[in-house]
Image (cartoon, rainbow, N blue to C red):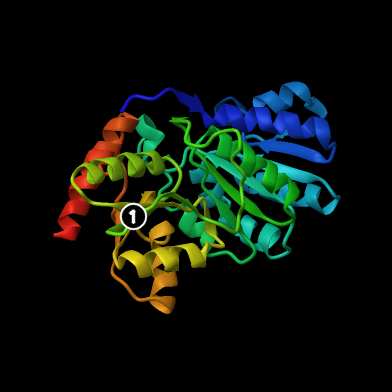
Amino acid sequence: MTRECKSVRSAYGKTLVELGKINKDIVVLDADLSCSTQTKMFAKEFPQRFFNVGIAEQDLMTTAAGLACTGKIPFVSTFAMFATGRAWEQIRNTICYSNLNVKIAATHGGITVGEDGASHQSLEDISLMRSIPNMLIIVPADEKETIEAVKFAASHYGPVYIRIARTNLPDIFDDNYKFDYKKAKIINSGNDITLISNGETLVETMDCAKILSDKGIKAEVIHAPVVKPIDCETIINSARKTNKVVTIENHSVIGGLGSAVCELLSENYPVKVHRIGINDEFGQSGNAKELLIHYGLDAASLAQKIIGILK
């Protein structure tokens, strides 16, 4: 299905500028990637409140922590691979251990980083951030939700990790959409199977549900933008209704959304959960759309897998 797509990275940059005009305590830091992360917009508008630390991601996080200790609200950006991998210890011991008010908005997560290949395709970032106490994790699915998630992060005290897609995404939510970090959103009601997704794979999941509907299969689609703390009630209620759950994510099947749902249901309502994502392997270089198809994350491949599960 062809849709007009919009840059969620640009939405992030524009929202930072909007917030910066309202709140002088907001500062932005980057690791020499401000053109890619779009923090360059904030740098142009507020040069005295923008800090490019260079290719030094560990310093990036500790500098943000220091600014948070003075009452500033730092938004820290670089690629997800470098933010969560190279600087994990600093995030854990300096930011989260002290529960500092630092917002990490990382771009270029998942297989859809594309041509940059495995070294830049962070398939573990959600898993790494989930393992740290005090960290709140958001994976927005379109431009509007990205804007609302960034505004929420600015108003919420404590560490926040936002995964911002490299790819342009079609609109899913309208101007009336309200972000509630405590609640997942039921996109489509159904009784045959529960599909849970977020981020870039949400639109593929929605299209998959349409394919399934044409075949007489009514799938309940749940959007879970907040992976931690995850909305227990919505997911458990849906699992009780369908007794079949599939998670779909642009991330390793280990430690991400699928693992969070498995942990939740195993303790509260044991039911079979099928995790669809990147298996225990590295990615490879290629066009983003072609990679989604190769790893079975496009709507047609998802529908085929789910029909197989139901059989």
Specify the amino acid type for callout 1: Gly
Q: Quadrant of the N terminus?
A: top left
Taking the image as drawn, is residue 39 in sight? no
In percent of width and height, residue 56 lies at 62, 41
Q: Is residue 287 above or below residue 292?
A: above
Going by the image, does 153 lie left or right of 212?
right
Disc 1 is placed on an element classified as loop
The residue at the point 41 percent across, 35 percent down is 113
Residue 168, above or below 179: above
Residue 45 appears in view: yes
* Residue 4 picture location, percent across and down: 43, 22
Q: Quadrant of the C terminus?
A: bottom left
In front of the other: 285 or 137: 137
The residue pinned by badge 1 equals 190
Q: Residue at x 24, y 41 (%)?
A: 211
- Expressed as whole percent of the image width and height from the top left, the position of residue 71 reads 85, 50
Question: Crowdedness of circle 1 by 10 Å Cα count: few (<14), some, many (20+)?
Answer: some
